[in-house]
Image: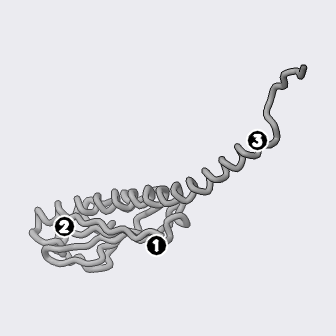
Amino acid sequence: MRSKRDGFTLVELMVVAVIVAILAAVAIPLMSANKTRAMATEAEAGCGTIRTAMRAMFAETSAYNKDLNGTAITAGALASTLPGIGATDLDGRFFDNPCYKISAVGTTTYTITCTGADSGAPQKADVAGVTVTLDDAGKITKTLP
């Protein structure tokens, strides 16, 4: 009569290793895409902050292209030049103040663009290909690598 052995055979361990490798091969690309989308939400939040400042300014001046002092706001202006937005208010882990620009502005329309390539934030390499735009209607467009 054979004695009972405890433990796993080499074949059983190899089968488990293959199954884990297959799961990792499927899960890692999915997680990478989710990570990039999660980073883009920081840009969306920053654009939302700018949108709030733009709406407050519009309530006072009835125009998006003039600040509270009547000074013109032109396309390409940094968002930190808007009243109510401080120099570090938009600084985050992936995106910082120079990323956010008013890319188009008119009396009743505007477009805010956040470009990861312009980032000086600590983890800027992770968002180099990310661009997020937000227009006056609230439409968000994302370009992810």
Name the mark on residue 13.
Answer: 3
Examine the rendered structure and indicate whether residue 119 appears above or below residue 45: below
The amino acid beneath tag 1 is Asp
Task: Select label 2 or label 1 by which is in front.
Answer: 2
Q: Residues within 10 Å of mark 1 (few under 14, many from 20)?
A: some
The amino acid beneath tag 2 is Ala
Q: Residue at x 61, y 56 (%)?
A: 25
Residue pointed to by mark 1: 118
Q: Residues within 10 Å of mark 3 (few under 14, many from 20)?
A: few
Residue that extends furthest to the left in the rendered view of this protein: 62
Counting from the top left corner in percent of width and height, residue 104 is at: 26, 78
Counting from the top left corner in percent of width and height, residue 144 is at: 44, 68
**Viewer-closest of 99 and 42:** 42
**Viewer-closest of 48 and 71:** 48
First reached walking from the N terminus: tag 2 or tag 1: 1
- Mark 2, secondary structure of its residue: loop
The amino acid beneath tag 3 is Leu
First reached walking from the N terminus: tag 2 or tag 3: 3
Name the mark on residue 84.
Answer: none
Q: Residue at x 81, y 25 (%)?
A: 6
First reached walking from the N terminus: tag 3 or tag 1: 3
Name the mark on residue 137.
Answer: 2
